[in-house]
């Protein structure tokens, strides 16, 4: 009998049904029952990782503590399960083929013809099982990206089909997520797309054990019986996933539908009593029912796709629940901000977040937003490039260096207050070459961030090439902007905060990667508290 059991989650009918949320919700429920659980994502795209992808293509790039640039679904896994994922939790077709080709070049295959089966599928299999060998997990949930029937997903489907027989049917469960659309013209919910999706899965040798049906309307017993009959599953294995106002309701709905119990029954594992989800229910209640509202402006340049800033948005919602307020976020495109409309764009907000990004597009709008927050005493939070914009704005308007800039945007500036990190000079390849992952930060005693964290040393995750130019540090400090966080090994400035301001903090790292539902990040919690105070003033 296998030591670790595996749950494989596939999707059909259409993309973006929420396989990541269903996987994370199941993981949360199994975890609440006392099982050690983790989740991995298999991505069919040929990029080695999403680090070089435009956010419009695939949403944000999530960074793990060990420095892996990964799919945004890993953010959902960490936020729901309150765990750390790693490089091993995200597999891409690009990385699989890169590994197989490197082995072929070394002669590892002894002159054999290298093929999708068995060489590619064996490498996928090795990556799936590697996670279980690294740590002693009871259950590993594996989400397969894409939609069943896609050409690029076929090697993954074939791999997990083989794994069912390698590991044994009692050690594997297949969950298939599909859509049950509602036709308003006839007033009917239609199950045919689900039937066809399951048929495609069967053609690839996989019989799903559990069906999770996304729907806008309640599914009655007759419809569930019809799906069970035509898709060869038990009635109890037809699970409804109805649309909800917040993704954090989904674990509670899956608990009502007994998804975790059904999965454990297939795995022949004890379900025990009712999992303790009381703390989770309290957070959902606050998210849905808090009467006080705090309005936050998120200034960025990828605002058309909210997934570009997924972790920041979720961190703000976590912090709102921690402060028992509802946080509403308006995403403002930095390219649209000008001196003429600055007041009109940003008035009425109780806090301003300037988001990360790369390149000079929209940079001046971000700098104007910083200037507004600084002069109007509005709580300000700058993240990565947001910190750098705050430094540029301060140098221009407080220190009098009118041409101050980052060498990323202007290599000829006389005052490069932001400059390329020394170890980045000479690097030409883009993928995986930034300062990535977790680094230690020492906090200045008595600073606002030290009080927020309530400790003197933290570890936070990074993703950047440029840094604050320490040649200007003394001048900044003398004028009221202090370095309240420093990396002890390199001396790099990690956090800047402005004195004589209610709340003005910028971080070179990405605190949003460490915020979870049950443990919201202290800087976001502190920021929302400052926004509440600003509104009351």
Image (tube, rainbow, N blue to C red):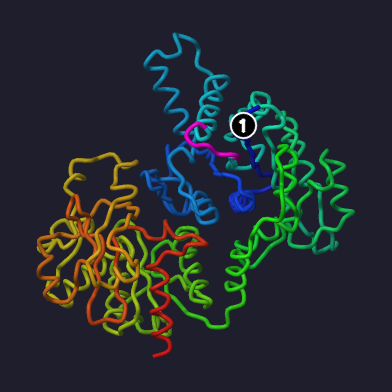
Is residue 137 inside the magenta stretch? yes
Quarter of the image where one finds residue 415: bottom left
Magenta region: 133-139
Q: Is residue 322 above or below residue 208?
A: below
Return the x and y of residue 369 as percentages of the image width and height. 32, 75
User: For this rendering, which residue is in front, 410 or 212?
Assistant: 212
Q: Is residue 163 left or right of residue 424?
A: right
Quick one: 270 or 103, which is closer to the camera?
A: 270
Image quadrant in which the C terminus is located: bottom left
Residue that label 1 marks? 154
Question: Which residue lies at the image location 23% right of the left edge and 75% below the top edge?
Answer: 498
Q: Position of residue 292 (x, y in %)?
A: 53, 83
Which residue corresponds to the image point at 46% horizontal and 59% vertical from the top-left? 311
Residue occupying image coordinates x 61% and y 49%: 34
- Does 406 appear in magenta? no
Mark 1, secondary structure of its residue: helix
User: 517 or 277, which lies in front?
Assistant: 277
> Which residue reaches farthest top?
111
Give the image location of residue 139, x and y in percent: 60, 40
Q: Residue furthest front?
A: 272
Left or right of 241, for residue 502: left
Picture quarter with the N terminus: top right
Where does the image place residue 128, in percent across and percent down from the top left? 54, 33
Density class for disc 1 (Cα within 10 Å; few <14, some 14-19, many ≥20) is some
Which image quadrant for residue 339? bottom left
């Amino acid at each position: 009998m296998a030591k670790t059991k595996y749950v494989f989650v596939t999707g059909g009918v259409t993309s973006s049904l929420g396989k990541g949320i269903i996987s994370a919700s199941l993981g949360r429920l199994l975890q609440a029952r006392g099982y050690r659980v983790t989740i991995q994502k298999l991505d069919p795209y040929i990029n080695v990782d999403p680090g070089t992808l435009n956010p419009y293509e695939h949403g944000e790039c999530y960074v793990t503590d060990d420095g892996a640039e990964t799919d945004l679904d890993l953010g959902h896994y960490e936020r729901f399960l309150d765990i750390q994922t790693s490089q091993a939790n995200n597999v891409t077709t690009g990385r699989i083929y890169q590994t197989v080709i490197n082995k072929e070049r070394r002669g590892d295959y002894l002159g054999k013809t290298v093929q999708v089966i068995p060489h590619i599928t064996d490498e996928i299999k090795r990556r799936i099982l590697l996670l279980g060998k690294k740590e002693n997990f009871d259950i590993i949930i594996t989400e397969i990206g894409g939609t069943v029937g896609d050409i690029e997903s076929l090697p993954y489907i074939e791999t997990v089909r083989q794994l069912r027989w390698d590991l044994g049917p009692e050690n594997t469960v297949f969950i298939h997520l599909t859509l049950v659309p509602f036709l308003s013209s006839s007033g009917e919910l239609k199950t045919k797309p689900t039937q066809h999706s399951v048929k495609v899965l069967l053609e690839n040798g996989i019989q799903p054990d559990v069906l999770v049906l996304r729907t806008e309307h309640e599914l009655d017993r007759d419809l569930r019986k019809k799906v069970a009959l035509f898709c060869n599953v038990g009635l109890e294995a037809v699970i409804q996933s109805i649309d909800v106002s917040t993704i954090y309701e989904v674990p509670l709905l899956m608990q009502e539908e007994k998804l975790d119990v059904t999965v454990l029954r297939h795995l022949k594992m004890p379900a025990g009593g009712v999992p303790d989800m009381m703390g989770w229910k309290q957070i959902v209640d606050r998210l849905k029912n808090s009467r006080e509202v705090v309005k936050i402006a998120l200034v960025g340049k990828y605002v058309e796709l909210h997934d570009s800033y997924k972790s920041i948005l979720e961190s703000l919602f976590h912090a709102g629940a921690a402060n028992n307020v509802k946080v509403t976020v308006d995403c403002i495109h930095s390219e649209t901000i000008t001196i003429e409309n600055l007041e009109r764009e940003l008035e009425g907000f109780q806090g301003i977040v300037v988001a990360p990004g790369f390149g000079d597009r929209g940079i001046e709008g971000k700098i104007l937003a910083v200037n507004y927050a600084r002069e109007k005493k509005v709580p300000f939070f700058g993240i990565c490039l947001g910190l750098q914009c705050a430094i540029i704005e301060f140098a221009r308007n407080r220190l009098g260096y009118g041409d101050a800039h980052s060498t990323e945007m202007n290599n000829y500036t006389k005052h490069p207050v932001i400059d390329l990190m020394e170890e980045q000079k000479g690097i030409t390849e883009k993928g995986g070459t930034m300062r990535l992952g977790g680094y230690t930060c020492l906090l200045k005693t008595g600073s606002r961030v030290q009080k927020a964290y309530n400790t003197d040393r933290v570890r936070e995750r990074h993703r950047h090439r440029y840094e604050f130019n320490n040649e200007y540090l003394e001048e900044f400090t003398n004028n009221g902007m202090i370095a309240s966080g420093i990396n002890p090994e390199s001396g790099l400035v990690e956090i800047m905060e402005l004195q004589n301001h209610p709340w003005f903090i910028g971080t070179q790292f990405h605190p949003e990667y460490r915020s979870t539902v049950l443990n919201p990040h202290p800087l976001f919690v502190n920021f929302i508290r400052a926004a509440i105070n600003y509104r009351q003033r």
